[in-house]
Amino acid sequence: MASEPVAAAPALAPAAAALGRGRARSRAAWRRRLTILAFLSPWLVGFTIFFGYPLVMTAYLSFTSYDLLSPPRWIGLDNYRYLLSEDVDVWPAVRNTLWIIAIGVPLQVLFAFGVAAMLTRARAGVGFFRTIFYLPALVPPVAATLGFVYILNPSTGPINTVLDRLGIQGPLWFNDPAWAKPSLVLLGMWGIGATMIIFLAALLDVPQHLYESAELDGASALQRLRWVTVPLVSPVLLFAVVLGVIQGLQYFTQAYVAANVAAGAASQAGGSSVLEQGYPEGSTLFYPILLYYHGFRYFSMGYASAMAVLLLAVAFTFTAIVIRQSRRWVHYQGAVR
Amino acid sequence: MRRLVMALAVLAGLVIAAASLAATSSPKAEELEVWVGWSAGHELVEFKKVVSEYDAKNKNVDIKVVGGIVDDKIFAALRSGNVPDVVSSFQSNNVGIFCPSGGWIDLGSYLKRDKINVNIFPAASRYYTQYKGTRCALPLLADTFGFYYNKALFKRAGLTRPPKTFAELSAYAKKLTVKKSDGSLDVVGYNPNALFYHGGAGISTYGTLIGATYFDKNGKSNLSRDAWSRLLRWQKSLIDYYGYDKLVRWQTGAGDEFSASHAFERGKLAMMLDGEWRVAFLKNEHPELKYGTAPMPVDPAHKSAYGSGYVNGTIIGIPKGADHEEEAWKLVKYLTTNDHALAKFSNGIRNVPSTRSSSKSPELIPDKNFSTFLKIFTHPKSATIPITPIGLDHLQTFSNFVAKWNAGDVDDLRAGLQEVDKTIDSKIKQKG
């Protein structure tokens, strides 16, 4: 009996030492994790409070009838049923939103790309032109929209005044349902500064020798654009498209301000006016604006939450599809997909 | 023993001194915070003047007025519990949420205790300060809509009196309209598009003039079955006279509604339906303008409605959780029922004083144009919009349709209005 511990001692010692080392490693690993967590905590706390909790609450409220003051009342899928089958404003708002994504986003991306491409070719005054094209991006959206509504005022705006002098009757711009969305696209194209700068950086990053090789192979300018430039800036193109689509799905400020100012409702006290939703004739009623009306004018926060959940689902799906499809046309230099 | 007597005497002296000090020094004044929507320079100043009179007479309170409050902020405050003592809103339709939710406390017990009969307020104001019998608000001045006409333009057109029916109004409008050489509109006789100007109140400003209702006895939307279609046809006929596109083009240059560039103030609009506040705007911005006021012309089928008009106004109440509820009530009572306070405030911002007695107060500064609105306010047929569980959504739905109708994008008016009724009913049903 007495020999057992003696005999076991040499075997146990390394095991105990290994155990001790293991514990120490585990403690160190925990300390490391805690340190990482401590460094991450500002973000984690912010994410939980300002994103996670509101997201969960939005999902919960979407199943309730809630006017912000009375306690939420559980109504199951009623909000979703009404949203998808009965609300007559939803589909026009969805159509308008899809229009701005399908027409506005490609035009803005192409325009930003075009301007950036031209700026890479400029021989003089490059800094000046870069500044000029970037400047609109610094103007707050509300101020920019007010400026455009003024410039495009059908009876007193400078554009129509000039057209009038030329004997052309200018359109009603923001006051005509056929012209209101194109006017918003014009406003969007004017403010492409940020996208343009990103394209410019990507274009300047394309190795010059690739153009020279293509040129030696007899490639035309269009072919060089198609087979050299576009593949090499395709990651930035993807970024611009995804960002544009998400911004299109959340399109609010410009449309809301333009509609209210053009309708003459901007000066109504306390925002109490009952004029038109999406003036003129619903042409600027975008999905986020309808959501805002339900949440903060009619105080149907449960219904507005259901609209928000649907918007999130659509944005997520849309982005996932674009990213998945992008594998076919986006070229990452030296990167493994 | 002597020492004891001395000590007792000193003690007694101290007690008496302390007691007399306590009796002579006034208790600390309680700070009452009052939220109001007025933000325009003179309106907020006038409200503060009325409040400061009360403040001066009541040493136990110290009132702090916060202007520029909109309903979003009121909702946020009620949700957070960080509320003022007294709160007011321009959006009376939200009593449909403030009252049943208890966000604004029921004033019934205070009214009963202080023996205030709400019949001191005309019917329309009584209506928009309660919801289903719960009175959580009282009216603080009111807005009424009437008819304004440019006397110089009338004289030039040979017109001697304001019109009384829609048919007359159309005839006058055509006489007063001036077109430029290129056919565009220079002076518009009357703009029947209720979605432009009209203080943002929109199509509802016409409801009383045609004797129309919004809902039937069963609470179902009634727009297609009532007089609205007659009104819309009349409005469209006048719009077509101008040409819709030409009228819209004119509107875009008509000037801001609440500035000196307003088309009526500049003589570019000969007649209009507008609120009583315009009297003060005209006095301040265009005192040279010769104009008159009258009740708005009415549908010939409802001639008895002549003299009435659309009524709405500011509401005031006490939020749940107010720190000084009793003192808040005393202030609300003073502001809404004291004839002197109402007349003083009315003189300041030229809104209609909201009790029957104050509308006849000798303190009101006499003004022939303004007195038209005092009569409209107390007319038995003057009315307001219904308060619904969906807030303004029913009016918004109707307005969206009216915009399409005015633009000529509706082929079948009756079918269109039936669709609007169906939509409003489904919205109310969805809200529960």
Image: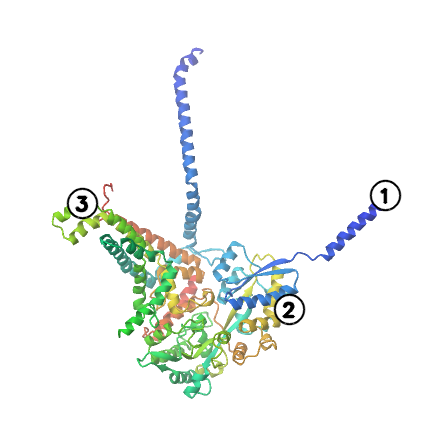
Q: Nearer the viewer, residue B299 or B72?
A: B72
Amino acid type assigned to the residue bearing label 2 in the image: Lys
Q: Estimate the spatial distance between the alpha carbons at disc 2 and disc 1, rounded to whole Å.
A: 60 Å
The residue lying furthest to the right in this view is B1
Quickly name the residue at label 3: A209
For mark 2, name the chain.
B
Q: Earlier in the sequence, mark 2 or mark 1?
A: 1
Foreground disc of the pair 2, 1: 1
- In the rendered image, residue A11, in percent from the top left (x then y), is placed at 38, 16
A13 vs A337: above or below: above
Please tell me how crowded label 2 is: few (under 14), some (14-19), or many (20+) other residues with Cα within 10 Å: few
Q: Estimate the spatial distance between the alpha carbons at disc 3 and disc 1, rounded to whole Å.
A: 113 Å
**Which disc number belongs to residue B223?**
none
How many dots with numbers? 3
- In the rendered image, residue A214, in percent from the top left (x then y), is placed at 15, 48
Amino acid type assigned to the residue bearing label 3 in the image: His
Please tell me how crowded label 1 is: few (under 14), some (14-19), or many (20+) other residues with Cα within 10 Å: few
Please tell me how crowded label 3 is: few (under 14), some (14-19), or many (20+) other residues with Cα within 10 Å: few
Q: Secondary structure at mark 1?
A: helix
For mark 3, name the chain.
A
- In the rendered image, residue A184, in percent from the top left (x then y), is placed at 32, 63
Quickly name the residue at label 2: B115
Foreground disc of the pair 3, 1: 3
Q: Secondary structure at mark 2?
A: loop
For mark 1, name the chain.
B
Foreground disc of the pair 3, 2: 3
Quickly name the residue at label 1: B3
Which quadrant of the figure has residue A87?
Answer: bottom left
Could you confirm whether marks 3 and 1 are on the same chain? Answer: no
